[in-house]
Amino acid sequence: MAFGPFRTLPLGATLHWSRAAPVDARGIAVAALGMTVPVLAGLALGRAELGFTIGLGAMLLAGGPDSPAQERSSPASAILPAALALTTATAIAGFAWADPVMILLAGVAAAISGYSRPVGVAAVRFIIYLVLSATLLEGAGSHRGGAALAFGLGALWNVAIRFLLAPRRAPATPPAQPARIPTPPQRRAHWRRTLRDLAGWQFPIRIVAGLAAASVLRHLWPSHHFGWIVLTVALLTQRPIEQLPVKTVQRALGTALGVALTWAILTSTTAPVLLGAAICLLATLAPIARARSYLAWSTISTPVILLVIDLGRPVETALLVDRLVATLCGAAIVLSGNAALDRLTRRAAPGI
């Protein structure tokens, strides 16, 4: 059956509010302290933008809704790809060839993501942090170095909080029958086998083609703020092709709702103290939303990113309209790429 992303999409799945996963009180505390302390320090020192950027780095390192619980709780599994992505984005920022290099590196990360599940999680994190860091640094202009340093400090601050609030570990009970773990040669052999057909290349092809299309659109209309298209594509592109793209639609709809929420906040106040209070509240609610609804998490996390990226710019309706249009364009690129690759892989698969 042909891939029809909206033909069979259930509304209930898109709007589903899950109560299966418990809300982690430690995660809420980490999110609250991670954002609130830097924001308060920045406001007290008269450097609100610095505090917001540090807080954003701390919030994003907390892990996304895609990550398994055990991987979210490991600081090293998040900080290594984040640090590598931020360093890379800082090194290429400002150059004319920054976009091609970013797209190439994203493709390489996607190609190696099939080696193992931990590598796959790290690769996706690297891609998202790379594009996000590039977007953040582009908006920083001549202050790219300071913005990169602040973003990195946020990551370290998050790790410090998680270390301080880490629960005492009970002695591990060895399993009755240890699970068989593939050896590195077995993993490499399996990975090479997956790259022998089109299905093994579908994620690199989709992420490279999607980011390239988004980059072209951004450069075709440089007067608009279409860098958000590139970030939207990075956020929406999942490793597997979703036959029923609930998460993609949730992310796209949540991002659009988040843009509307950002507009509501910015048209209500421009005072740094009130903006800081709104950002801290949203960051504190993010872990609850992450445990309950991908749609809610996307809606809440989008204003935090936008408020930090656009901090200090005049509040213009055109800017937020650009963000909304960019979100819809990015979603259209991802869904079109999913549909095209799904058809190709089905035709290439034996017996179909």
Image (cartoon, rainbow, N blue to C red):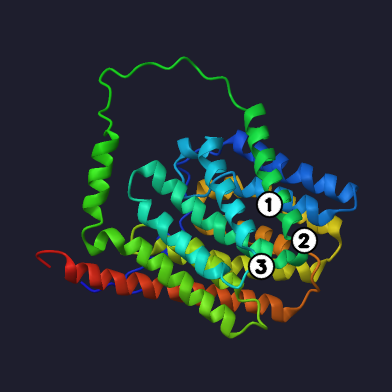
Q: Which of the marked residues, 3 or 1, is nearer the chain's N terminus?
A: 1
Q: Quadrant of residue 94?
A: bottom right
Q: Quadrant of the N terminus?
A: bottom left
Q: Which mark is residue 143?
A: 2
**For discs 2 and 3, the disc positioned in front in the rendered view:** 3
Q: Is residue 295 above or below residue 94?
A: above
Seen at 86% across and 62% down, the residue is: 271
User: Is 341 displayed left or right of 91 in the figure?
Assistant: left
Q: Quadrant of the C terminus?
A: bottom left
The spot of residue 83 in percent (x, y) is: 59, 46
Q: Which of the marked residues, 2 or 3, is nearer the chain's N terminus?
A: 3
The spot of residue 59 in percent (x, y) is: 64, 47
Rounded to the nearest angstrom, the CA distance separating label 2 from label 1 is: 17 Å
Rounded to the nearest angstrom, the CA distance separating label 2 from label 3 is: 11 Å
Seen at 50% across and 57% down, the residue is: 127
Residue on which disc 3 sits: 94
